[in-house]
Image (cartoon, helix red, strand yellow):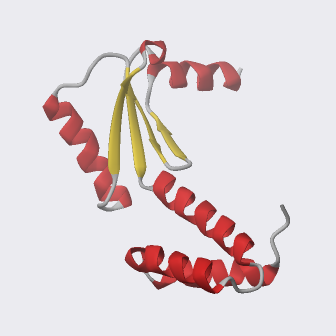
C-alpha cells in the first residue's frame, strides 16, 4: 500500500507527541476518520513496531549465563543505549564462545564464530 507524504507526516507528528497518548490519539483518528486515516494508522503501527524493536536486546551466548554475567552484559548495553530496554537471553551453541548482542538493528558480535567468520573473509 502506497502511503502519501501527508499521511507519513501526520503519523510522525502524532507519534512524537507522546507514546502514552498514542492510544487516545488512535481512538480519535478512528472516530473522526480524516482523509487517509487508514494510511496514518498503518504508519503509526510501523513506527511503534520499529520503536519496540529498537528497545529489545537479545544476548546470545554459547552456554547459559549466570546472574552476574547477565548483569554485567546488561550494564554495558545500558551504558551505550540507555535505559528502558527489554532483555532476552538465548543459548546458541553455534557461536562457540563469547557473546553476540543485538540491539534493534545493531549487532555487537564478540563471539568466537564471528571472529572465525571475519578471519575467513579476510583471506
* Residue 62 higher or lower than 100, as above or below: above
Number of numbered markers: 0
Residue drawn at 42 percent across, 13 percent down: 93
Q: Position of residue 71 (x, y in %)?
A: 19, 40
Identify which residue, 48 or 78, lies in the foreground: 48
Quick one: which residue is furthest to the front in this view?
Answer: 31
**Residue at 68 percent of width and 25 percent of height:** 122
Expressed as whole percent of the image width and height from the top left, the position of residue 92 reads: 43, 18
Image quadrant where residue 43 sits = bottom right
For residue 97, which quarter of the picture? top left
Instruction: Locate the C terminus by quadrant.
Output: top right
Residue shown at 17% from the left, 25% from the top: 66
**Residue 102 pos. (x, y %):** 47, 41
Q: Decide if residue 118 is on the left or right side of residue 103.
A: right
As drawn, the residue found furthest toward the right would be 2
Q: Please tell me which residue is depicted at 45% across the width and 79% down the height of the picture.
A: 24
Q: Nearer the viewer, residue 78 or 90?
A: 90
Quarter of the picture containing the N terminus is: bottom right
Q: Residue furthest left?
A: 68
x, y percent for residue 28: 54, 83
In the displayed structure image, the side of residue 75 where residue 46 appears, left or right: right
Amino acid at each position: 500500500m502506497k502511503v502519501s507524504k501527508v499521511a507519513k507526516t501526520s503519523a510522525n507528528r502524532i507519534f512524537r507527541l507522546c507514546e502514552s497518548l498514542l492510544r487516545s490519539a488512535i481512538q480519535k483518528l478512528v472516530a473522526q476518520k480524516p482523509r487517509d486515516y487508514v494510511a496514518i494508522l498503518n504508519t503509526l503501527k510501523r513506527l511503534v513496531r520499529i520503536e519496540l524493536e529498537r528497545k529489545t536486546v537479545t544476548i546470545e551466548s554459547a552456554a547459559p549465563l549466570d546472574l552476574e554475567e547477565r548483569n554485567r552484559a546488561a550494564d554495558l548495553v545500558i551504558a551505550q543505549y540507555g535505559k528502558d530496554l527489554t532483555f532476552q537471553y538465548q543459548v546458541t551453541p553455534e557461536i562457540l564462545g563469547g557473546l553476540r548482542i543485538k540491539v534493534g538493528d545493531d549487532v555487537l558480535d564478540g563471539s568466537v564464530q564471528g571472529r572465525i567468520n571475519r578471519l575467513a573473509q579476510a583471506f
